[in-house]
Image (tube, rainbow, N blue to C red):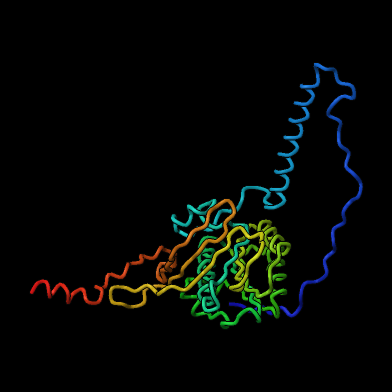
Amino acid sequence: MQLIRNSGGPGARAAGRRSDTPSAVPRLLPSNPQADDRPHAASFANDAGDSRLAALRRTVARLETGWLGAPPPPLSLDLPDIHRHLPDAGLAGGALHEVSAAAYGDIAASFGFTAALMACATRARRGPALLVVSRRGTDVGSPYGHGLRRLGLDVGRLLLVETRTGKDALWAMEEILRADAGAAVVAGISETPLDLTMSRRLNLAASAAGTPLLLLRPPAATGLSAATTRWRIATAPAGRDRFEAFAGWRWRVALERCRNGRAGQWTVEWDHVAHRFRLAEVVADRAVPAGTGRARHRRAV
């Protein structure tokens, strides 16, 4: 695991200029149409308008994704029940995905869930895994190599970038994606509020690179965002084996927002041997209520 410290922030960017020259609109109808030709001319105008609207939509979609060829493959979670709520069999490969803790005490759990997603990405994709951490955004401590290894993340492929502020972390994530470093996954921790403009920049950068971007946000993070998915993570009792020993970490996972998908909630468990997700088998408490056994004994007597 290599550590890179970034002491500088984002530099000045040139603002785009807007042209004031009106675009020429071709004339679709004749100046003096005949009475019999008016319905035909109106139909021609409607067809031309529909074709232009379809072309404009294709252009906007191409600008939003930045893909010149086929879209990158999705990041599979190996959970068909969750995949049914997503537009594809996993997380979109070139898009921004937000992860937030349900409460302040769940920040460590949300980071563990993000690290598990990074482990899935490194197994399915080539290249290094980059983790951008803001010093002010890590209230629960710094990433620990042995703990990341237990989650299946190869620390030999991990590059840790440390910044002073959350704003610098957002800038570093965008620059890493635009540098086309061939990363398997890029993840970041930032306490800075994320507005719609910055989220769009990060989503476009991830789309152009074809790399999944995982952004860990504070628990109170809300508002508009261009992220494809938004996950809310809470702690859950750890899984136990038949000897009541520790068997795996568990999270309460809530998919709050999904573009072209639908929301859902699950209890997810991490298999620390196979290094993969699985749905936890939550067993109801079958304990005998107080007094039930005594009442049965009285009736028997």
Please identify the residue farthest to the left as the structure is shown.
301
Q: Residue at x 58, y 77 (%)?
A: 1
* 246 horizontally vs 43: left or right: left
Instruction: From this view, report whether residue 288 is shown above or below residue 181.
Output: below
Front residue of 85/69: it is 85
Query: Where does the image place residue 129, in percent across and percent down from the top left?
Result: 59, 69
- Say which of 30 and 95 sits in front: 30
Image height of 235 relative to 55, above or below: below
The vertical placement of 170 against 196, above or below, is below
Tell me where residue 224 sits by quadrant: bottom right
Residue drawn at x 70%, y 80% is: 164
Q: Is 272 in front, or is 196?
A: 196
Q: In the picture, which quadrant includes the C terminus?
A: bottom left
Q: Quadrant of residue 256?
A: bottom right
Q: Nearer the viewer, residue 221 or 295?
A: 295
**Residue at figure coordinates x 53%, y 81% from the top left:** 144
Number of residue marks:
0
Residue 130 seen in render? no
Q: Is residue 264 visible?
A: yes
Task: Give the residue at the far right of this rendering.
Answer: 21
User: In the rendering, at what x and y percent does residue 121 appear?
Assistant: 54, 63
Task: From the top left corner, tell me how far across and down residue 115 is, in percent.
Answer: 53, 71
Measured as percent of width and height from the top left, residue 13 is found at 82, 66
